[in-house]
Amino acid sequence: MEKLTLSRAKELLAATTTQQHLFEHAIGVSACMGAMAEHFGADAEYWQAVGYLHDYDFEQYPEEHLAHTQQPLREAGVDEESIRAILAHGYTLRNEVEPKTDMEKSLFTVDELSGLIAATAKMRPGGVTDLEASSVRKKFKDKRFAAKINRELIQKGCDMLGMQLPEVIAICIGGMREHAEELGIGAKAE
């Protein structure tokens, strides 16, 4: 069985998802995952593909997210390593699939973090283009800003990775910068 590719991940997500904000989230997580893969010296496109597909069943089953992922993806020919990583991003919230590998721990961490970075970037004229990790860190501490984002999960993920939050934020900002236009977080026109 071949590793998941980004084009296959896009095809699979398009079969279950219609909402634009979910595609933007997929792109954001994918961008962060590619940057994390580069940090760990891993296959960036593969990690991007897994990040892109992580919310495969979310739109159809928001209350049962990840309960309708394993079988359909297996039937679609997705490799077990990808399926396990996708399931592990729901650790403690949706299941008990504990993130073990750098890829699984990264997905667990950047799922929420990508949303915080995007929300911070949208507040700034320069978007993500001149965003510093310190600005995101300030918003991380402000519980009222993007209040739905689970900061405990982000911190738990950083701890699992053995990395400091500012370092993970900086890596993810770098990944998201490359996709600024697609994500709608580029610099605003004067």
Image (cartoon, rainbow, N blue to C red):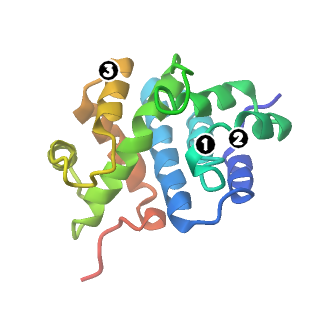
Q: Is residue 129 visible?
A: no
Judged by depth in the image, the label closer to the viewer, 1 or 2, is 1
- Label 1's element? helix
Q: Amino acid at mark 3?
A: Asp
Q: How many marks?
A: 3
**Spatial distance from mark 3 to mark 1, Cα to Cα?**
27 Å
Tell which circle, 3 or 1, labels the residue nearer the N-terminal end. Answer: 1
Tags 1 and 2 in contact by the CB under 8 Å rule? yes
Does 133 sit above or below residue 20?
above
Coordinates of residue 130 in the picture (x, y in percent): 23, 58
For residue 38, side relative to residue 117 (left or right): right
**Residue situated in front as seen by the camera: 26 or 67:** 67
**Spatial distance from mark 2 to mark 3, Cα to Cα?**
29 Å
Judged by depth in the image, the label closer to the viewer, 2 or 3, is 2
Q: Is residue 85 visible?
A: yes
Q: In the rendered image, which residue does mark 3 sit on?
A: 159
**Residue situated in front as seen by the camera: 38 or 5:** 5
Q: In the rendered image, which residue does mark 2 sit on?
A: 68
Disc number placed over residue 130 in the picture, else none: none
- Label 2's element? loop
Residue drawn at point x = 30 percent, y = 32 percent = 152
Tell which circle, 2 or 3, labels the residue nearer the N-terminal end. Answer: 2
Coordinates of residue 44 in the picture (x, y in percent): 55, 36
Q: Amino acid at mark 2?
A: His
Q: In the rendered image, which residue does mark 1 sit on?
A: 64
Coordinates of residue 159 in the picture (x, y in percent): 32, 20
Q: Amino acid at mark 1?
A: Glu
**Residue situated in front as seen by the camera: 136 or 88:** 88
For residue 134, side relative to residue 183 (left or right): left
Q: Residues within 10 Å of mark 2 (few under 14, many from 20)?
A: some
Residue drawn at point x = 40 percent, y = 33 percent = 109
